[in-house]
Image (cartoon, grey):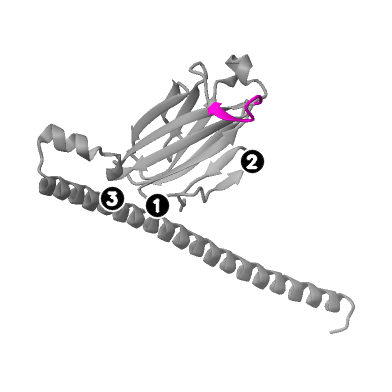
Amino acid sequence: MLMRQGGSMMLSAAGIVLAFSWFLPGYALYFHIGETEKKCFIEEIPDETMVIGKYRTQLWDKQANSFLPATPGLGMHVEIKDPDTKIILSRQYGSEGRFTFTSHTPGEHQICLHSNSTKMALFAGGKLRVHLDIQVGEHTNNYPEIAAKDKLTELQLRVRQLLDQVEQIQKEQNYQRYREERFRMTSESTNQRVLWWSIAQTLILIVTGVWQMRHLKSFFEAKKLV
């Protein structure tokens, strides 16, 4: 589970960030990437769930000795894969962007970002800071906009929010059942393999023992010891 302060596992060598958020509605964090570096996040998402990601970039300025807003020419490429490693989104954005997708398969979705630094001499060898904010489920809804569009009262809007939350909880519960079923199937398959391996080991020991006894009997008979 990813904590809001960036409690994620970062593998600097591979440039991969694993971010699990089974129960949190979203998270905000920032990270640094180099010229050719790629950062990926793994998000466990139920099926039929909307995800909205927003990001903005800052470029390291040696003169100011701090991160400043990146130039408009600097962009980010966003690629998203579903649990079957099928690409569901692959698009080039600007220095600030917003991407949206809906999950159709429950499980781990991979969200990867990398810059178009190779096209910019300004960023060559530099460092980029990316602020990323991801919202999942009912938290992707803009309720003030919905209230204004549908002319909802405060009570009606609150009921709408509660209904969306209940729907998201049901999706989370269904996903947990799905994960539990997969785990149970894996456990049963493993137990079955262990059982058959134990039976095979027992048969091998019995066959080896019988062979050794017959071999020893033949040896002693040949030496006329029995």
Q: For mark 2, what is the residue?
A: 12
Q: Which residues are magenta?
A: 62-68
- Which circle's residue, 2 or 1, is located before the other in the chain? 2
Q: Label 2, label 1: how many angstroms apart (C-alpha)?
A: 24 Å
Q: Label 3, label 1: how many angstroms apart (C-alpha)?
A: 11 Å
Q: Residue furthest bottom?
A: 226
Neighbours of disc 1 within 10 Å: few (<14), some (14-19), many (20+): some
Asked if the residue at tag 1 contacts the one at tag 2, i.e. Cβ–Cβ closer than 8 Å, the answer is no
* Residue 171 tag number: 3
Residue 44 visible in this rendered orientation of the protein: yes
Q: Nearer the viewer, mark 3 or mark 1?
A: 1
**Is 22 left or right of 31, judged from the image as shown?**
left
**Is 207 left or right of 190, judged from the image as shown?**
right
Q: Amino acid at mark 1?
A: Trp
Q: Residue furthest front?
A: 64
* Residue 22 tag number: 1
